Amino acid sequence: MKASRIAAAGAVAGVAVLTLSAPAFAHVSVQPEGEAAKGGYAVVNFKVPNERDNASTTKLEVTFPTDHPLASVMPQPIDGWDVKVTKSKLDKPLEVHGKKIDEAVTKVTWTADDDGIEPGFFQKFPVSVGSLPENTDELVFKALQTYSDKEVVRWIEVPQEGKDEPDYPAPVLALSEASADGHSHGTSDDKAHEADEDKSAGDAEKAAAETTAAADSGGTDTTARVLGIVGIVVGAAGVAYGVLAGRRRTSA
């Protein structure tokens, strides 16, 4: 009896250890390249890992938020994947740069041409989005991941603050505060633009320095030529004076 109880307790303990030590499954997530600032534009990546050993991920459907619709959504082409952008009418039109927009992207679907995301791999799906809303701290994107064996995993559970992460959390994009001038800074496009401005300023300064140096050089050459001519004239006058003086002495 004691042996049986000990064996049962050991089995329970073993299961508990395995449960606690088992790694959490990776899930579909969204992250910006750089930062996603309120009121600005950003490139975000939907990261999709393959969690199956005997099937590939062949389709990804991402539903975009309708409570904070985005006026601009542009997926980046990916080799081996077809992309479809779905737009829908908005209940409340958006006003962007003085224009009213009555429809927005509500879903983007990627479908694999071939094997898709095979076991042991992941894929990023980049999308340019904007302008990002200024009246929320995050955007929730619900995603459906379809495998080659027709299994569909629904990443649609919205995480709640103060509660454990759900089993199938929806991708959530955290938004950062806009800078003091109301623009987003720190992205690769911004840095490239700033680098171009610095280069242009440096080129202008270099050109100005070269022009000044050329002017200085030209002034120096002109002065040298003038002094040379004056020297020649003075020398010629000295020679003529010497000749005349010699003739006078001879005559005397």
Image (spheres, rainbow, N blue to C red):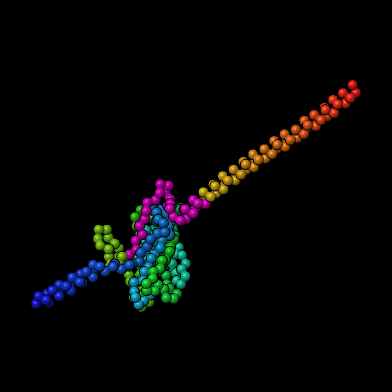
Based on the picture, tell me whether residue 65 belongs to the magenta stretch.
Answer: no
Occupied quadrant, residue 165 = bottom left
For the residue pair 211 and 246, the one nearer the viewer reads as 246
- Answer above or below: position of 232 versus 98: above
User: Does the segment drawn in magenta span residue 185?
Assistant: yes
Picture quadrant of residue 233: top right
Q: Considering the image in quadrants, where does the C terminus appear?
A: top right
Left-right relation of 160 to 61: left
Residue drawn 80% across the image and 29% down it? 238
Counting from the top left corner in percent of width and height, residue 61 is at 38, 69
At 11% from the left and 76% from the top, the residue drawn is 3
Q: Quadrant of the N terminus?
A: bottom left
In the rendered image of this protein, does residue 129 appear above or below residue 11? above
Question: Would residue 232 appear left or right of 193 to someone viewing this image?
Answer: right
Q: Is residue 198 visible?
A: yes
Residue 231 locus on image (x, y percent): 75, 33
What residue is drawn where x is 23% and y is 70%? 18
**Highlighted magenta segment, given as a residue range:** 170-196
Single out the residue that lies furthest toward the left. 1
Query: What residue appears at the point 84 percent right and 25 percent down from the top-left corner?
Result: 245
Q: Residue furthest top?
A: 252
- Image coords of residue 212 (percent x, y): 62, 41
- Which percent across, then down, holds residue 17? 21, 69
